[in-house]
Image (cartoon, rainbow, N blue to C red):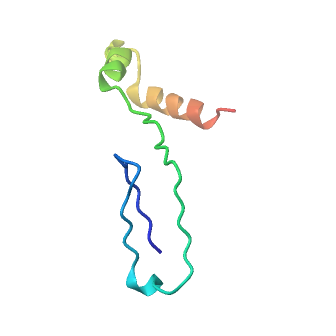
Amino acid sequence: MLRQILEPKTEEYKLLIPKEYINRKIEILVLPFDEPTCACIDGAQILQNTAGLLRNKKLDPVQWQSNLRSEWDNRP
């Protein structure tokens, strides 16, 4: 099987067919390929949202982390 993803710059494209497919019926498809949008993480935004969270001396970081994880696990 041959699969190639490319971005054509013209309406014409030269197709090279592998030797093992010569004298056989083959199917050629041309379909749009939409890449998924990136769910990128903005490091600066994360830093801004979390800066100073552990400044509170009464806060136990391990307990705080455990609570965060349990909230995530108990989501609907």
Give the vertical position of 26 relative to 57 (above or below): below
For this rendering, which residue is in front, 44 or 63?
A: 44
Which residue is pictured at 31% across the width and 26% down the height?
43
Residue 28 percent location from the top left of the image: 53, 66
Residue drawn at x 47%, y 75% as measured from the top left: 1
Image quadrant of residue 61?
Answer: top left
Task: Determine the residue positioned at 45% across, 30% down.
Answer: 65
Locate residue 34, reporting x and y percent. Answer: 49, 44
Query: Up-down: is 44 above or below 2?
Result: above
Q: Position of residue 32 (x, y in %)?
A: 51, 48
Residue 60: give x, y in percent of width and height.
Answer: 41, 24
Q: Nearer the viewer, residue 48 or 34?
A: 34
* Nearest the eye: 43 or 37: 37
Q: Which residue is rendered at x = 41% and y = 56% of the image?
A: 5
The quarter of the image holding the C terminus is top right
Residue 43 as seen in the image, left or right of residue 20:
left
Q: Nearer the viewer, residue 60 or 51?
A: 51
Q: Is residue 27 visible?
A: yes
Tally of numbered discs:
0
Q: Is residue 67 left or right of residue 50?
A: right
Extreme-front residue of the structure: 12
In the figure, is residue 11 to the left or right of 55? right
Report whether residue 57 is seen.
no
Above or below: residue 2 compared with residue 43? below
Q: Residue furthest right?
A: 76
